[in-house]
Image (cartoon, helix red, strand yellow):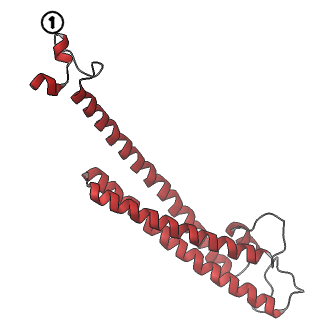
């Protein structure tokens, strides 16, 4: 993590070697958690992508199963995020700087060496995956809203809503605006 024989920038030079080891261990744990978080968010992105296909196919059972998997995945993501925050708070005790909360971005500015490079890479990955998740979620939301609109239109047609029933000739009677089921029966 740190250049051999040097304390990382931002770490108090008066701290003991045990403190440096502690910082190293915390940072290694943080990298593992962030890597797991990135892998997990990528899995969530895959679930959302599959959900799109299931929505287009109209596969209700698969959508329901997928939604349950997403709920479990989101719960795990929250746990990983909480662990990441806990580790960042732990590192903040060893890092000089402002009183503001320590973030991955700020930490990569404070640390040097391969750990800082790995954290920067993982941070970029998290941001990219999160952006893709947001975009895919918006597409899925649009598909769901369109489906609901079409279902609503179909229900209005079946119910005979006069506002949506077309009139084909000037001589239409009230009966032509009646529900399709009533006109057939």
Report the quarter where the N terminus lies.
Answer: bottom right
Which residue extends farthest top? 171
Residue drawn at x 56%, y 67% is 78
Q: How many marks?
A: 1
> x and y percent of residue 123 in the render?
60, 68
- The outermost residue toward the right is 14
Quarter of the image with the C terminus is top left
Q: Nearer the viewer, residue 175 or 26?
A: 175
Farthest residue to the left: give it.
Answer: 185
**With respect to residue 162, does 95 lie above or below?**
below
Q: Residues within 10 Å of mark 1 (few under 14, many from 20)?
A: few
Q: Using residue 29 as the reference point, say whether residue 157 is left or right of it.
A: left
Q: Quadrant of residue 47?
A: bottom left
Res 176 quadrant in image = top left
Task: Find disc 1 in the rendering and name its residue.
Answer: 171
Q: Residue at x 69, y 67 (%)?
A: 105
Left or right: 27, with 134 as reference point = right
Q: Position of residue 59 (x, y in %)?
A: 26, 55
Residue 21: percent from the left, percent from the top? 75, 91
Helix or strand or loop: what does disc 1 sit on? Answer: loop
Q: From the viewer's perspective, is 24 left or right of 139? A: right
Instruction: Answer whether residue 17 is visible to the viewer in this image.
Output: yes
Q: Is residue 26 above or below residue 58?
A: below
Residue 3 appears in view: no
Instruction: Report x, y in % for residue 66.
Output: 36, 62
The one nearer the camera, 116 or 35, is 35
Residue 174 in which image quadrant: top left
């Amino acid at each position: 993590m740190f250049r051999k024989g040097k304390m990382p920038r931002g770490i108090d030079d008066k701290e003991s070697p045990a403190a440096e080891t502690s910082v190293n261990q915390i940072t290694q744990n943080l990298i593992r958690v962030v890597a797991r978080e990135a892998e997990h968010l990528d899995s969530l992105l895959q679930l959302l992508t599959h959900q799109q296909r299931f929505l287009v196919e109209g596969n209700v059972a698969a959508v329901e199963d997928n939604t349950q998997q997403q709920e479990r995945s989101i719960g795990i993501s929250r746990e990983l995020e909480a662990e990441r925050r806990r580790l960042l708070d732990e590192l903040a005790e060893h890092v000089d700087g402002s009183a503001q909360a320590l973030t991955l971005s700020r930490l990569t500015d404070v640390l040097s060496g391969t750990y800082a490079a790995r954290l920067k890479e993982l941070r970029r990955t998290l941001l990219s995956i999160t952006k893709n998740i947001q975009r895919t979620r918006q597409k899925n939301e649009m598909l769901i809203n369109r489906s609901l609109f079409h279902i609503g239109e179909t229900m209005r047609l079946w119910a005979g809503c006069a506002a949506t029933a077309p009139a084909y000739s000037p001589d239409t009677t009230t009966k032509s605006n009646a529900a399709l089921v009533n006109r057939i029966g």
